[in-house]
Amino acid sequence: MFLYITQGSSYLVPRAYAIMHRMHHAYSDTEKDPHSPHFFKEVFTMMWHTKKIYQGLLNNTFKVDEKFDKNFPVNETIDRIGDSWISRIVWGTGYVLFYINFATHWWMYLLLPIHFLMGPVHGAIVNWAGHKYGYRNHPEKDQSKNTLPIDFVAGGELFQNNHHKYGSRPNFANKWWEIDPTYPVIKVLDAVGIIKLVRAT
Ligand SMILES: [Zn+2]
C-alpha cells in the first residue's frame, strides 16, 4: 500500500520490476540487459524496449529464467488497481488539483508531465546516464558509472558503479565525499517499521 501511494500514477508491479532489475544486474550492458544505453541511439527507444519487456512480464508473454521469478511481494489487488488506467488518471487528476491549489506561477504547470510520468522519467535518467556518464570507483565488467558525487537528481540511483559492485548495500555512496540522499530515508523507514533492512551498510 505504501508503495502504491508513493508511486501513484507511475505504479510498477513489484514482480515485473524485480525481474527486470535482477536481469539488469545479471546481464548488465549485454543484449539481455532490459535497459542498456549501449544498444540504443537515444533514450526513448531504450525506454520503449524496457516497457515492452515490462508488458511482456505482466502478460506472461516474456519468457523468464525461473531464478529471477521469486522472492518479491505480491498483492494482486493493489497490482490490479495500480496498473489500471483509472488509477493512473485519478492520481494524475490529484496532481493537477494540488497544482491548482498551491502553484504560484503559471510556469509551474509545465512540471506536471514530470509528475504524471515520474517513474519512467526517473528510470530514463538513471538507466541512460548511470551507464554512460560519470566516473568509476570499481572496475566492473559492465559500463556502470557514478554520475554525480552528490546525487540530488535521482536520489542516489546515479551511483550505478557503486551499486553494481555492492548490489545488496542500501547505501549507494562508497567514498566519504559521496552522498546518497535516500539512505537516511531508508534508515527512518526501517526505524518506524515500514520496511525492514536486511543489511545496514
Ligand atoms: Zn545499472
Image: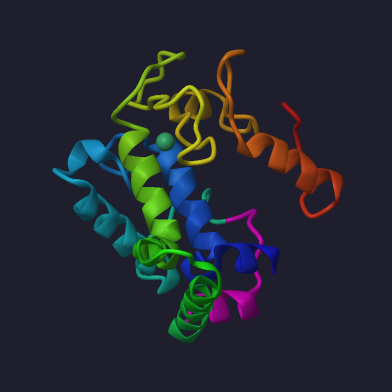
Foreground of the two, 4 or 67: 4
Where is residue 183 drawn, in percent x and y?
A: 67, 35
Where is residue 182 drawn, in percent x and y?
A: 62, 39
Q: Residue at x 53, y 35 (%)?
A: 156
Foreground of the two, 29 or 146: 146
Question: In the figure, residue 98 lies in which quadrant?
Answer: bottom right
- Any magenta on residue 78? yes
Where is residue 1 drawn, in percent x and y?
A: 69, 69
Query: Is 30 placed above or below 114 here?
Result: above
Q: Residue at x 43, y 26 (%)?
A: 148
- Any magenta on residue 17? no
Q: Quadrant of the C terminus?
A: top right
Residue lying furthest front in this view? 104
Q: Residue at x 37, y 37 (%)?
A: 27
- Magenta extent: 70-84
Does residue 196 show up?
no
